[in-house]
Amino acid sequence: MTQKKRIVIIGGGFGGLNLIKNIDKKKFDVILIDRNNFHSFPPLFYQIASSGLDPGSISFPFRRELRKGKVKGAKYNMGQVETIDFANKTVTTQYETINYDILVIAAGTTNNFFGIEGLKEQVYTLKSTGEALRCRNEILYRLEKASLAKTAEERRKILSFTIIGGGPTGVEIAGAIGEMKRYVLSREYPDICIDDLNVTIIEGTDRLLRTMSPRSSKETLEYLGHLMVDVKLEKTMKSYENNIITFADGSELYSEMVIWTAGITGEPFTFVGGEPEITRGNRFVVNEYNQVAGVEDVYAIGDISSHSDERFPYGYPQLAQVAIQQAITLAKNLNKGEFKKTFNYNDKGTMATVGRNRAVCDLNNIHLYGRPAWAAWMFVHLISILGMRNKISVLINWIWAYCTYSTSLRLLFSPTKYPLKSSQKE
Ligand SMILES: Cc1cc2nc3c(=O)[nH]c(=O)nc-3n(C[C@H](O)[C@H](O)[C@H](O)COP(=O)(O)OP(=O)(O)OC[C@H]3O[C@@H](n4cnc5c(N)ncnc54)[C@H](O)[C@@H]3O)c2cc1C
């Protein structure tokens, strides 16, 4: 009997979980380390932030998931990996140090504030369930506060929302707040006039959704206009102080709530006993087998890896499909014990939604807009969500919201301050 090799996976997102699904647990001991005890579904974070979905419908507890189906047999340990020791082959979290034979880094990315001073402490972000919930609470709190304000000027200040970044996440959250303005305010917040709420989206280049087709950008601009979202193109934010955004061209904008969707960077680690090659965006440089350059027995998949070729000289796009396909290829190679299968990205296209009946899809040679695109967007997201219970819950929520514009989720749950003791290290 030979002892099974131990694979340690950092991160149970799209990459990590799909690797577990496809790795042969009879050949390997698999340990997943994630700082959260659940897998989440980032494409729908904006719906948590805009009270469209509750976090439970798009979160999946690892301990339940790892008991069944193709992922059965892997072990989950909670922890935030802080240090990787390549010489001794260990990873260290705030709770423990674990040995590995093979390490797979699938930790994804975090927000990048490009060194703008004080931004992290002041803006709202959408990179995790917790961040989306904070965003939701702040929007709801502002709507309540504005309802109590004495003057229109006061209300306008409280309800000045700005989204920085005109990529899919920025467009989706801008559209969702625009829908609140157009369809929800008059029904649920009678003390607020439609003109009291202002939503602005800022993009540095000359079009929204610049990774999609020009027609998709144009349609998106129109959809946002219909939802009364102010779009400012070719504007770069330089600073945000005392509720004033200053742009590179010297112009200013007053905004009390800023949602930052403009940049991401690889999750940081401390390295000991080896120096992996890191490239721009704090991503690990990997080859066509996802092996990390500069260190042995270490692989990186998903958003934190950078595999470049002629098609993608700056690395493959940071998308769920890339992470899933890399995980499947890596699992096949590890299962076989030899590295023959190279990663070959099958680009299935991209899509974004702005609101009900308003979406854009660029699927290879097929381009969809409006209602058909919106139906395709819903279908793709629904089938991608893990678990039948969650699929049904999301579908019911969407049908209900479609028919009534109403949701039972505009609830302000604030965490209590005491007791101060916490089992989790902050
Ligand atoms: C708001 C939003 C919307 C998006 N929309 C789309 C979309 O519509 N379509 C699309 O294709 N892609 C979309 N993406 C991108 C997509 O989510 C990513 O490409 C995908 O999640 C990458 O998978 P991953 O496994 O590399 O990382 P992730 O899915 O981010 O998973 C990383 C995991 O690692 C854990 N982790 C991180 N650091 C540590 C650490 N130090 N220790 C322990 N655990 C750690 C995290 O908790 C997380 O569970 C979106 C992303 C966001 C944020």
Image (cartoon, rainbow, N blue to C red):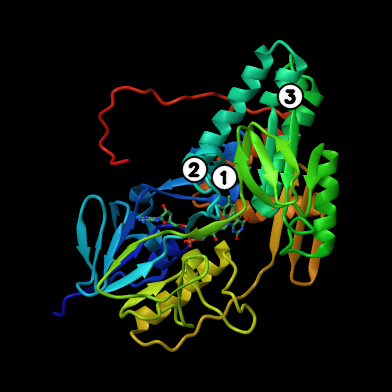
Q: Is residue 54 visible?
A: no
Sequence-wise, the earlier of marks 1 and 2 is 1
Q: Quadrant of the C terminus?
A: top left
Which residue occupies 61% across, 41% down?
240
Which residue occupies 33% across, 54% down?
67
Residue type highlighted by circle 3: Arg
Left or right, residue 11 beside residue 139: left
Residue type highlighted by circle 2: Thr
To which residue does mark 1 refer? 45
Find the residue positioned furthest to the left: 1
Mark 2 nearby-residue class (10 Å; few <14, some 14–19, many ≥20): many
To which residue does mark 2 refer? 129
x%, y% of residue 60? 44, 47
Left or right, residue 253 beside residue 100: right
Find the residue positioned furthest to the front: 250
Q: Secondary structure at mark 1?
A: helix
Which residue occupies 36% across, 47% down?
37
Ligand 1 within 8 Å, label 1 CB: yes
- Give residue 205's quadrant in the image: bottom right
Q: Nearer the viewer, mark 3 or mark 2?
A: 3
To which residue does mark 3 refer? 156
Is residue 143 placed above or below 398 in the rendered structure?
above
Marks 3 and 2, how far apart at CA:
28 Å
| Camera-side residue of 47 and 328 | 47
Q: Are marks 3 and 2 in contact (CB under 8 Å)?
A: no
Q: Is residue 345 visible?
A: yes
Q: Quadrant of the N terminus?
A: bottom left
Marks 1 and 2, how far apart at CA:
7 Å
Marks 1 and 3, how far apart at CA:
26 Å
